[in-house]
Amino acid sequence: MLMSDGTLRVEYFCYISRAKIDQLYEQVDPEAAHEITETRSRESAVKGEAVADWGIPHVLKLFKTGASYGRTGRIQREAKIKRTYLGKLERVLVAIAEAEPIPDAGRIGHPSARGSRFFHHEGELGLERPLADRSDTVVTLAGDLTGRPLLLDCSLRNFSEAVGPDGQPHVNSANHRFFTESMRFTMTTVFLLLEATADRVVGTPLFLKLSLPGADTLTAL
């Protein structure tokens, strides 16, 4: 993807919370699949400007580029299942944004965002603690919200490249710096808010979309 500053970026969904998407998908109107196609033709294009709230156009923009669950060009396990979850994720996000625009996480606690369950965020995220025990099933990503820690709890099995055929954590040369050294990467997410205090914000993501420099041909989470 060519950015506005002329740099190349590689984007893809590296994480989708399958259980949460399944639960939310059951609440989506069965006609939503047809409505998404119609909505694409009705909604105006979204340029690169930063906005506080995500409406339907911003959701659809997520799927215009980098719309793969896992890095393209790699042999993907569960390829058919992953394509199914991308479709479910899009319908769920459109339904959320249609009911109420998704606020920026920086507005958590602001009166205008009171009552919102889901927030969007873009920034650097990395493991709060390196993955040491291969029996771990949940990891926490840490970021920053203008001085407040943002903590996102993730099921390890939902990362596109993190689990092997045996269901165990699969740390390799493509992801070990992220999982064992807590290297941070730029990610976009919509998360379910679990807790917000003066000291921290805790949530769990519906998805994580990874953005890498175009020259990075190896990293795969």
Image (tube, rainbow, N blue to C red):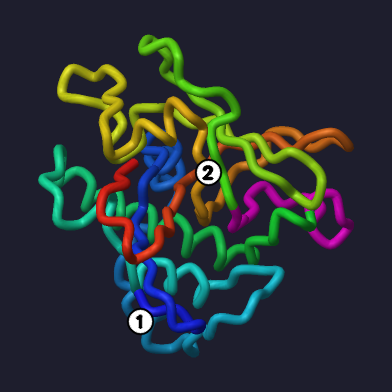
Q: Is residue 79 visible?
A: yes
Badge 2 crowding class, 10 Å Cα cut-off, few under 14, some 14 to 19, many 20 or more, is some
The image shows residue 5, relative to residue 56, as above or below, that is: below
Residue 17: within the magenta? no
The image shows residue 205, relative to residue 10, as above or below, that is: above
Q: Identify which amino acid the numbered label 1 is placed on.
A: Glu
- Name the foreground residue: 88 vs 190: 190
Quick one: quadrant of the N terminus?
A: bottom left
In the image: residue 184, left or right of residue 136: right
Badge 1 crowding class, 10 Å Cα cut-off, few under 14, some 14 to 19, many 20 or more, is few
Residue at the spot x=36%, y=67% of the render?
Answer: 63
- Name the foreground residue: 82 vs 172: 172
Looking at the rendered image, the disc whose residue lies closer to the viewer, 1 or 2, is 2
The image shows residue 152, relative to residue 63, as above or below, that is: above
Residue at the spot x=30%, y=54% of the render?
Answer: 86
Q: Identify which amino acid the numbered label 2 is placed on.
A: Arg
Give the residue at the far left of this rendering.
75
Query: Magenta part of the protein: which range?
Result: 108-123
Query: Where does residue 174 sit, x and y in percent of width and height?
Result: 28, 39
Residue 119: within the magenta? yes
In the rendered image, which residue does mark 2 sit on?
A: 184
Query: Where does residue 50 sit, x and y in percent of width and height?
Result: 65, 75
Quick one: quadrant of the C terminus?
A: top left
Q: Is residue 31 visible?
A: no
In the rendered image, which residue does mark 1 sit on?
A: 38
Q: Quadrant of residue 203?
A: top right
Which circle's residue, 1 or 2, is located before the other in the chain? Answer: 1
Task: Please say if the residues under marks 1 and 2 sit with CB atoms less than 8 Å apart.
Answer: no
Per the image, label 1 sits on a secondary structure element best described as: helix
In the image: residue 4, left or right of residue 144: left
- Name the foreground residue: 17 vs 74: 74
Query: Where does residue 20 sit, x and y in percent of width and height?
Result: 45, 37
